[in-house]
Image (tube, rainbow, N blue to C red):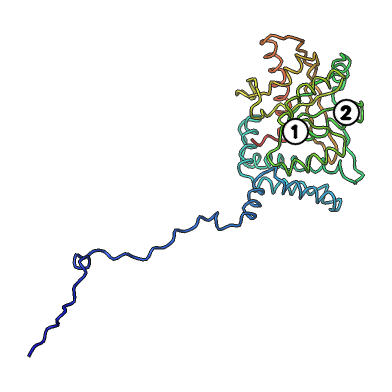
Amino acid sequence: MSHSSPHPRAEHPERLRGAPQSEPTTPPARPLHAAIPARLRALLHDLTQHDSVIWRRAMQTGVEHGPDALVRYGPTLFGVAFAATLPRHRAAVRRNLRLALGPLGPIQEARLIAEVFSNFAASLTDAFVAGSDRRDRLIGACVNEEHYQAAVARGNGVIFVTAHTGGWHAAGPLLQSVYEADVLLVMQQERDERAQAIQDGARDRIGVRVVRPEDDPLAALQLASHLRRRGVVAVQIDRLPPGMRGRTVDLFGAPWQMPEGPLQLAAVTGAPILPIFTRRVGYMRYELLISPPIEIGRRPTEAALSVAARQIAAEMESFVRAHPTQWFHFA
């Protein structure tokens, strides 16, 4: 005798329709950078920047505590490390060398690139040595110093236009020691404030005063006043800071934006512009190459300003072509 269940089991309607069963979800994978601690990420980023605090601290520590051999010859190793770990900057240096020298063979090009970074590291090291307790002092030789004397004799102050070349830090202290020149160095704000503080400390110890226009809206008045007291204002013209007005010139056959500031400052004060470029010739030894003064005069025309800008660019181009591994333009 058969028995049927009084309460037959009911099938779930979705199961009867063959609805797909939900699978357990797997959380999305975290991006690789999220798994790296923030401090380590910051350290790795610093290693890829030529102007970061980590490189400056390493040089400062080496100068303050390292043996003489490290201080004298270590920058070559630092330069190789710079070149190896900074591919973007290496590409910029390669481009600069090709602009200045034309096509190069791969071996020659690699050697010159390494030399640029080594010269950069050596110049930074010398700047720290100059501001340290070591007894080594900067030694400089002026080439065509009669141009400087002629510019000073005009009595309106002097505007140095220079570039980021070997020993860019040396011109002011050397001229102060030899000619008692009162030099103000105009520099843009550095990307890494910590690195800037370290470098400014070294400059302070050798008597270099720095003005940063981004920090002071009245900087132009300060510079004009300094020139009227027959002082010297030094400006780097191979980079155009953001927000600053520029003037287009021809450099290595291509358009180049030069800061307008030195031209306008000369127009307001009557100070002559003196192109002066420095190169490192040995440990703590520099050569200052001085070009003839460029006169703009008060209330110059646009044509006169353009002529002066082209003269400045031509002097810089001539220097870089003659000394291509002494130009540190990494942008």
Quadrant location, the C terminus: top right
Q: Quick check: 257 above or below 113?
A: above
Label 1: which secondary element:
loop
Residue 110 lies in quadrant: top right
> Residue 161: x, y in percent?
76, 24
Q: Give the labeled residue for mark 1.
A: 165
How packed mark 2 is, by other alpha carbons closer than 10 Å (few <14, some 14-19, many 20 or more), is some
Find the residue positioned furthest to the left.
1
Residue 88 lies in quadrant: top right
Amino acid bearing label 2: Leu
Amino acid bearing label 1: Thr
Residue toward you, 95 or 33: 33
Residue 283 lies in quadrant: top right
Q: Which mark is residue 175?
A: 2
Residue at screen point 76% across, 49% down: 57
Find the residue positioned furthest to the bottom.
1
